[in-house]
Amino acid sequence: MALFKRTPVAPLEYTRKTWMRGWVGATMFFLYAPLLILMIFSFNDSKRNVVWKGFTLKYYEKAMNNDSLVEAMVNSLTIAGLATVFSLVLGALAAVMLWRFRFPFKGAIEGTMSLPIIVPEICLGVAFLIFFAKISWPTDLPWPLNLSAITIAHITFCFPFVAMVVRSRLESFNKEEEEAAKDLGASEWQTFRDILLPHMKPGLIAGALLAFTLSLDDFVITFFTSGPDTITFPVKVYSMVRFSVTPEVNAASTILIILTIVLTAVALKLQGVKAIAESH
Amino acid sequence: MAGGLQDWKQHKRPFAAIAGAPLFWLLLFFLIPMAIVWLYSFGENAGPADIAISGTLENYKRATEWLYLSIFLKSLAVAALVTLICLIIGFPVAMAITFASPKWRPWLLLGIMLPFWTNLLIRTYALMMLMGTNGYANKGLGALWEGASWLRTLVGMQPLEAWTPVQLLYNNFAVVLGLVYVHLPFMVLPLYAALDRLDKSLIEASLDLGAGHLRTLMKIVVPLAGPGILAGVMITLIPALGAYLTPDLMGGTESQMIANVIERQFKRANDWPFGAALSFLLIYAMFILIALQSMRRDKGREAH
Amino acid sequence: MDFKTLLDNAQNRRSLLKGMGVAAVGLTFTGALAGCGEKEAKKLANGEEAKLNFYNWDTYIGETTLEDFKGASGVDVNMTLFASNDELFAKLKAGNPGYDVIVPSNDFVERMAAADMLMPLDFAQIPNFEKNVAPEFKDVPYDPKRKFSMPYTWLSLGIGYRKSKVKGTPDSWKVLFDSDEYKGRIAVLSEAGDMFRLYGKYLGKSVNGLTEADIKTIEALMIKQKPNIKAFHEDNGQDLLLKGEVDVVLEYNGDIAQAMVEDEDIGFVIPKEGSQLNSDNLCIPKGAPRPKNAHAFINYLLDAEAGKKITETILYPTPNNAAKALMPDDYKNNPVIFPPADVLAKCEYAKFNPELQAKYEEAFTRVRAA
């Protein structure tokens, strides 16, 4: 009957199985429950934001008028964006290098490439602090170059994560496809671009999301590499701990979340509209 | 997998093009800064703000005392538990994303990542608000308890004794929960990347041949997703080992992890050489593990 | 996987990346436009740029203080934030990246002075010091004759408690350190030095006079008390009290005074054995690019009217007598903010001692691992 147009669940359509939906649903609930609390408490009329005192919109006003908060957020997003792009490139190259070639000291280099993941953040932060101080990295450049020290540090600890994810993805690559392309006359670059790159795509997406997340929320390394003119969002929030994390911060975070959802929805919609237009 | 590794000597140009950038970056912006700190681990404090590199091994000797080794082992155990829980929770989620229709997939991915674009501190505070003694979890549990008690009186049984809130915070349970909460996407993403390439016809074939879903999962899916699982485990275990904010905020008096100790050396104790020594011991151990694993992996591929 | 599905999948992933790319670019442009209105550095009469980099704790300034200063002197103050003294010290240890005024606590003033990281102050540029600062802050053990620092606020440690859950007034350190009366409802500081020194006070000694044997005794006491303690907090004990997680907490009087505004059931007392005093100070780090502006700013913060505005916002005890006189009575006579003189007599400043500090840290790590 057309009314109940439910196609039967195929054996491989795991996502439509009830238990799977239940599992994912429960996980999402676990992940989002604190977020909901965060958003609700952004309307809390209390400076310390510990107990619910009353409803107010004044912290949204304060957040949007708070220049330093907005600046901090813009800085964080900029750094995260730049760091993600560079980490993707470096990470992908590193993954291909490790996966494809045999060269002396390969084990040691692979270990070294994983080091930024292992090093305790504070150790890395201090290392960067001293490094940039010793080479007298300029600290009063105009925006966005003043974020360069922070960005370099972020790229350094993000790209090994990307490399690891992309590497695991490459393990499942069927070399015969590459050889077939070469047999048909493709050059190295063409092979890379048209055969290897599409295969790496899910790894690259996952790596990009990972790098973006790591960079956006980093505090320790950013703290040590930021100068007097560069305030980022996590550093601002952490410094509020001594006195009070006012609902202002909750308000700013809520705005960021909603902005991200809206932007992605718009991007996907545009993609969908384009596809429909193209298919006509 | 057919075809082994290419020797770099025979493909010098592609090798240079591919390996040049990452190696150069690693050298300049990682090895050199870390070398400075490495030198510090052989130094000692000469006055409150200067460090004299005297080639002493005192710091390493102190770092290998049982006090610090025991803390390290405990942290390793907690991190391993967190990784295991993340794997169990994350694997079905990664499968759900892989097998979802293309319309929903980006939304599911975004759904997993979105909470992690909120600042960690605020999220932790929100989590603590949920789990506190007067938090909403306890309130909810208390309401359920009271409800059950009331039902019992209806039926004529003795009511349950008064509700005392469950201690969900300031103990090791809170630390594990908090760390799982923070590291879940780090497990899901590599799993998704690996599962995505899974040849679905293999699963269909297995099901057709009569194996149940669980058996198919264990014998077909998991081995093929092996590299992804390994990547996910590494990306979760190692940062979990280095986590210090969550144990600091949510842990009780029993929850000191090695990262807290290292952090304190660089900050309060102002003992950078000792902090460096502790950090590097951690690094040496992990480095050896990863190098060994890499050599084993390549030997396996050569054998094809 | 056939070609079409491959394309479809690729489309969706690309769109996700695109979406994020658009967002990043869009926000970068907004930021660039915002940053385009960058202030051109003008030169003041004193020859320095009209700018100041102020490194301070969060919300540790009046709501309009920075704008008022800009109006009065034309100097644009750029305030960046740190969350603890250690971070401040670690950041400046490798060299001053361009800060003009910083706000360390008293023991860090000592430490930084010993490490030659501070610039001596020129009293001629800070006339408000003589006029407005209370006499007991003009010469202090941690900075004799005020060579490097000016007082900004002062604090004392004590016991914050929830009146309805506590019998009488818990006026001895025993409640926190040596008894299971409030088992599982106690929170103390996680800072090794402060903890050891206060235990010393409990044992009847001076905060700066602990010996090796004392440290061992105290370590044993701490391990014995650990099961009764719920948490070692990082200076947010007042939140724990407000949330009802604990009923007695070791905290600063200023923090508890702020909490008392939100909840009347909270009280504070300095134990009879005496306690430790703290003070946050204004200093100029060596290598500050604009020392003259820095002096002018410090002088402005010590002004009566500006000081009053600052105190109204942060409600901490102030060493600025002129500002204190302008505050309302419920602040001036608040026994929590300004404890009685006889109690204060038993309170001391902690002295910076690098060897003892290292011993405290090691012992405290052992306590936490026990």
Image: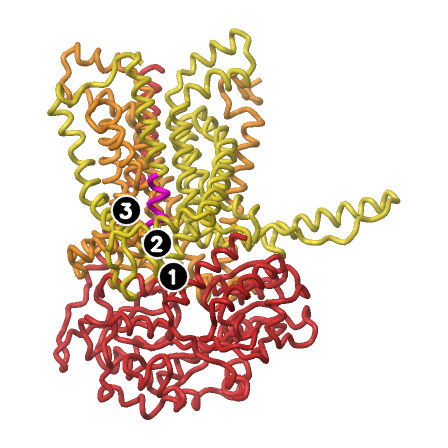
Does residue A229 appear to the left or right of A31 in the view shown? left
Subunit ID for the residue under disc 1:
B
Q: How many neighbours does mark 3 have within 10 angstroms: few (below 14), some (14-19), or many (20 or more)?
A: many
Task: Residue A39: tell me if it is visible.
Answer: no
Q: Is residue B247 left or right of residue A76?
A: right
Q: Are marks 1 and 3 in contact (CB under 8 Å)?
A: no
Q: Colour of chain C?
A: red
The nearer-to-camera label among 2 and 1 is 2
Q: Which mark is residue B274?
A: 2
Instruction: Name the residue beneath numbered marker 3.
Output: A154
Name, please, the residue furthest toward the right: B156
Mark 2 vs 3: CB contact within 8 A: no
Check the picture and name the quadrant holding the C terminus of chain A: top left
Q: Residue at the top extreme?
A: B209
Along the line of sight, which residue is nearer the eye, C188 or B161?
A: C188
Determine the colour of chain B. yellow
Q: Are marks 2 and 3 on the same chain?
A: no
Give SS at disc 2.
Answer: helix
Chain A shown in which color?
orange
Give the label on residue A189, or none.
none
Name the kind of residue labelled 3 in the image: His
